[in-house]
Image: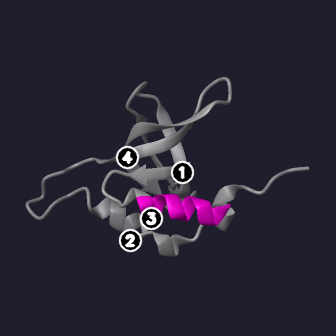
Amino acid sequence: MEWLELEFFDDVSFDDNDNEEWMNRQTDEEGVFHPLMGRGLHVDNEGIKKYKQLIIEKYDDKTEKFEGKWKHSNKAFKLHRLYICLDSEDPRKYALRVANAF
């Protein structure tokens, strides 16, 4: 039996911005770039899942995933928004979003 991916149950109404708006927030009014940072659900080689710090570089509209690098390893990632808690969002709202998807 295969399980459905959790992102199919994601309710974006818990998010204050859509994905493109989050990406646009990287540049302030003076044109200074500030990377979008947060914590994402990282799965290690043993299948252990932990939220780890990341830096977001871009958003792929076709796959609906954010792409960037893990801060601890500098390795690339691709994650759906549901698996990323951004530093600039309310973590309580994020937790409600994840809980609602279950």
> Does residue 44 sit above or below 24 in this rendering?
above
- Helix, strand or loop for disc 1: helix
Q: Residue 38 carries which label?
A: 4
Residue beneath disc 2: 16
Mark 1 surroundings: few (<14), some (14-19) or many (≥20) residues within 10 A: some
User: What whole-number distance in Å separates the C-alpha atoms at marks 3 and 2?
Assistant: 9 Å
Say whether marks 3 and 2 touch (CB < 8 Å): yes
Q: Which residue lies furthest to the front in this view?
A: 92
Q: Which residue was labeled with disc 3?
A: 93
Q: Which amino acid does label 4 sit on?
A: Gly
Neighbor class of circle 3 (other Cα within 10 Å; few <14, some 14-19, many 20+) is some
Q: Local crowd at mark 4 within 10 Å, few (<14), some, or many (≥20)?
A: some
- Circle 3 sits in a helix, a strand or a loop, which is it? helix
Looking at the image, is mark 3 or mark 1 earlier in the sequence?
1
CB contact under 8 Å: marks 1 and 2? no
Q: Earlier in the sequence, mark 3 or mark 4?
A: 4
Residue at image position (67%, 24%) is 46
As shown in the figure, which amino acid type bears the numbered disc 3? Answer: Lys
Amino acid, disc 2 = Asp
CA gap, disc 1 and disc 2: 16 Å
Q: Where the C terminus falls, by quadrant?
A: bottom right
- Residue sitting at x 67%, y 66%: 9
Amino acid type at mark 1? Tyr
Front tag of 3 and 2: 3
Residue, disc 1 = 83
Instruction: Point out the stretch of residues depicted in magenta.
Output: 92-102
